[in-house]
Image (cartoon, grey):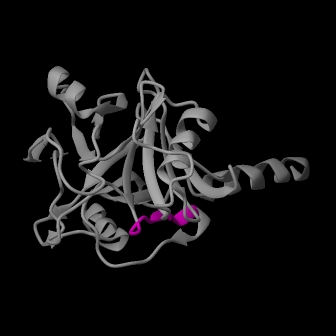
Amino acid sequence: MRRFLPLLMLALTVIASPARALDCQRLSYLGTPYTVCEVDPASDDLRLFHSDSRGLLGSYGRIDQMLANEGRVLSFAMNGGMYHPDRAPVGLYIEDGVEQTRLLTGASDGNFGLLPNGVFCIRDGRADVLETLRFADERPICRYATQSGPMLVIDGQLHPRFIPDGTSRFLRNGVGTSADGRRVVFAISDARVNFHDFGLLFRDHLKLPNALFLDGKVSRIYIPAQGRADIGFPVGPMIGVTVPLGE
């Protein structure tokens, strides 16, 4: 019996350990540190969150309070797109199959209007970053979707307005997807970075043909398994992965 104790203890340790619903790592690229998390949309419960019957969610804690009714909890979260002063989404926003705000296709002020911009669309078994006009033409059925801008990478090409020595440098976060929609990679810079280098991270290092800027300045990430919970004032749309409570 004694010889089986180490195996038994190992099995109990595995059972008691938190489940890892995604792979997160720290890396450095072109001198900038990043935190990068890869999600499998075919197996991970990837969603968008904005509000519930009590109003704006806006924080990891409020999302976890809402998820408690399902017996679930966040294993990852990131702010998921731009918003107005009242925290309403800018551009298209779909949650649980319901379109809450419409798609915007014209130019506008700020980063959102730096065309081309795009849409992050979560479907059954896959997720895709699509340039806005392509999205308007194809009209995929999204369970969740958020529009933001600018696009960082469009079919393997950097956004045409990006310049290598751009002086606009902020903390930034974004999402990239593979051509088949099976790889979804979220990244946040842990130091200030310009759009050009942030786009190169997705295209040249992560090898993703399409990537979308989600936001800057307010960028934050939540990875409880790593003890990371960036703080700040409430935000608008948020993207998260949930797991059963206790895993």
Residue 21 visible in image: no
Location of residue 130 with respect to 221 vertically, above or below: above
- Front residue of this view, candidates 118 and 145: 118
Q: Position of residue 203 (x, y in %)?
A: 54, 34
Task: Quadrant for residue 150, please give it.
Answer: top left
Residue 93 as seen in the image, left or right of residue 120 = left
Is 26 inside the magenta-drawn segment? no
Query: Residue at image x 24%, y 64%?
Result: 236
Query: Residue at image x 32%, y 71%?
Result: 59
Query: Residue at image x 21%, y 60%?
Result: 50
Location of residue 199 with respect to 68 vertically, above or below: above
Residue 191 visible in image: yes
Q: Where is residue 245 in the image (x, y as percent from the top left)?
A: 42, 60
- Front residue of this view, candidates 182 and 115: 115
Is 223 inside the magenta-drawn segment? yes
Residue 92 as seen in the image, left or right of residue 178 = left
Q: Position of residue 192 (x, y in %)?
A: 55, 64
Location of residue 117 with respect to 68 vertically, above or below: above
Query: Residue at image x 37%, y 44%?
Result: 45
Task: Quadrant for residue 238, please give it.
Answer: bottom left
- Front residue of this view, candidates 81 and 183: 81
- The magenta-colored residue range is 217-225
Q: Position of residue 214 (x, y in %)?
A: 36, 52
- Front residue of this view, candidates 6 and 237: 237
Residue 120 as seen in the image, left or right of residue 217 = left
